[in-house]
Amino acid sequence: MPQDLSPLWISVKTSLLATVITFFVGIAAAYWMLEYRGKGKSFIEGIFVSPLVLPPTVVGFLLLMFFGKFGLAGQFLEKFGGFSVVFNWYGAAIAATVVSFPLMYRTALGAFEQIDKNLLLVAKTLGASQVTVFLRIMLPLSLPGVLAGTTLAFARALGEFGATLMLAGNIPGQTQTIPLAIYFAVEGGDNNEAWFWSLVIMATSLSGITGVNIWQESRQKKKARRGEGDNKQLLLLYCSKITFHPQRAADLFLALFSALSAPLRFFSKKSYTGKEVTPNSSLITPNSPLIVDIYKQLADFDLQVSFSADNQPLGLLGGSGAGKSMILRCLAGVETPSQGKIILNGRVLFDSQTKINVPSRDRKIGFLVQNYALFPHMTVEKNIAFGLPKGLSSTAIKQQVEAQLVALQLPGLGDRYPHQLSGGQQQQRVALARALASQPEALLLDEPFSALDTYLRSQMEQEMMAKLADYNGVSLLVTHNMEEAYRICPNLLVLEQGKAVQYGSKQEVFERPSTVTVAQITGCKNFSPAVVVAPQEVEAIDWGCRLRVIEPIPNNLSYIGIRAHQVNFTNNADQENTFPCWLANCIETPHRMTLFLKLQSSAENVRDYHLQAEIFKEKWTTIKVQSFPWYVSLDSLRLILME
């Protein structure tokens, strides 16, 4: 054992100081890069991780040029501080900080990226500030990764050699750290001292990593006993098992080499062209509680919608990628429109002309997302209390939480965690209670029933309808399910590729869809190009027949259609709009039969058909025994004329 133990104390204090600095700077940098969407992100990323992939001597040389006598920082410190960091232990701490920073930064960033973005979105809509979201949501959920990064940073700082030697030198008792002591002990032929310091540094580093692993394993066991899986932390557990050696740590971040060669990548990004918004004023009712007139440029299409909503639920109906969820995100303040205006109860939430963009936390909008986004580290009570107005006493908070639990049939579940709730039914109730607890002026429901089993969906729909009937604010429901939209929402807005193609009452939208797209979205399966051949008479080109119609024929008629369940079978061949048909194919469902029919002649194969007809199985038992041709009647009142 060497008599001089100064390398131990110098290494400990420089490593601790470096770890403290990298802890705060690394987390701050990771948080900033997580939110950063500007140009040059790849280049900035490359700068942050460069100390991890550059040789330590190169890092030390650059630091020496920066902090040296003629360097920018060196001259500043000499002029205003009267000291230099070169060849003293401050230099060793700076070198250790720089080389350990990438480990803290990347591990923290990876931990932040593992957090479900919906959790952060919902927290903001519940009135939480950025600081509250970070301290109460992000930091607790990313704690395993942050702790792993801190341990890695300490181990890397403790083992730093090349950069320290270049900047601080090897001055025994002043700048000589354990790695330097090992090197010069071997160089001087004193292997015993080298062995001693090697064992010290290995024991110190490995004990820290082992301690983190033990903490992680005990944490996992506790969660397992509570029945909670934690798959999202597997990457963080892997990070915590990396040894302190920089070469092994570099393996985790090998993919980041490409960032160093991409400083100009950002010049190819698409920029907003400033397209003018042309609002559809016919869809906006003045003085409505909610008025939306926005334009947003997206990668695949441009979202451009104008509509208003009252206190009756409005359903946003459309296919995937139509822009439904993006509208909700713009309303909640999570996304910013390129142009336009959003007004809620007379309050301007967004106005591109006057540069108004109210933060999510101040918009008073509740958001129920598809996966419900319950905070997994909080109990049911704390989840609901998170949305309560600030400044309430603990007694008032408890009373309001209990009231919400009782109202949504959740009594006695307040002390449970989200993973302990039985299925999506109870989780949805908690999410709805949390959203309503914040007393929002508008409630956004993004496919709230998509995660539920079929047998639960009907029950939850009825509960949702009851809650919305008592809710006095604006409510918007996004869904792919036309029947769900019809049952819940008196009014519907149908979207296609970011545009509103029809807006009106549900009866109007379903009975008189204006376009083929709207008819398809609302479940119509039978279409044919159509031309006008006489007053109130149309020829269905694909079907090969002429049809009498009652509805006024649009000037720009393009298609005619009829819903499958409105195709009637008859024995009277002389009825109006009645045609002979032959069966091409049939498909059985639990309660119905879908028949594929060809008009005027027999079908050559299963794909040779004109119409689909849906009938109950009781009707099928009487039809299937009849000889061909059968006869179908297309009721004039049921025919859909589309532009």
Image (cartoon, rainbow, N blue to C red):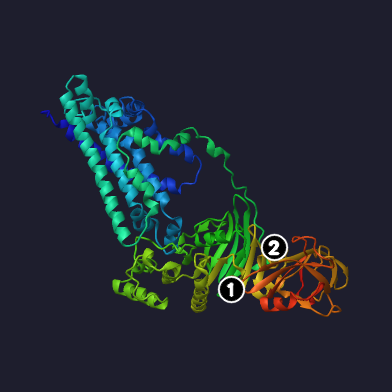
How far from the left and from the top, in percent, is residue 355? 53, 56
Which of the 4 quarters of the picture holds residue 121? bottom left
Q: Nearer the viewer, residue 318 or 267?
A: 318
Locate residue 524, reporting x and y percent: 70, 68
Q: Amino acid at mark 2?
A: Thr
The amino acid sitting under disc 1 is Cys
Q: Position of residue 135 (x, y in %)?
A: 34, 56
Q: The residue tagged with tag 1: helix, strand or loop?
A: loop
Visible residue check, residue 272: yes
Q: Residue furthest left?
A: 3
Q: Earlier in the sequence, mark 2 or mark 1?
A: 1
Tell which residue pokes out farthest to the top in this image.
188
Mark 2 Cα shell of 10 Å, populated few (<14), some (14-19), many (≥20): some
Residue drawn at the location 56% of the way across and 63% of the way down: 342
Q: Are marks 2 and 1 in contact (CB under 8 Å)?
A: no
Q: Which residue is mark 1?
A: 489
Measuring 50% from the left and 35% from the top, which residue is drawn there? 262
Of 390 and 449, nearer the camera is 449
Q: Is residue 8 left or right of residue 147?
A: left
* Residue occupying image coordinates x 19% and y 30%: 197
Drawn side of residue 556 relative to residue 419, left or right:
right
Could you say whether the residue bearing mark 2 is in a helix, strand or loop? helix
Q: Residue 313, percent across and down?
A: 56, 73
State left or right for residue 521 relative to residue 114: right
Give the residue at mark 2: 517
Within-10-Å neighbours for mark 1: few <14, some 14–19, many 20+:
many
In this view, 266 is above or below 113 = above
State left or right for residue 331 relative to residue 387: right
Q: CA distance from mark 2 to mark 1?
A: 20 Å
Residue 612: image quadrant is bottom right
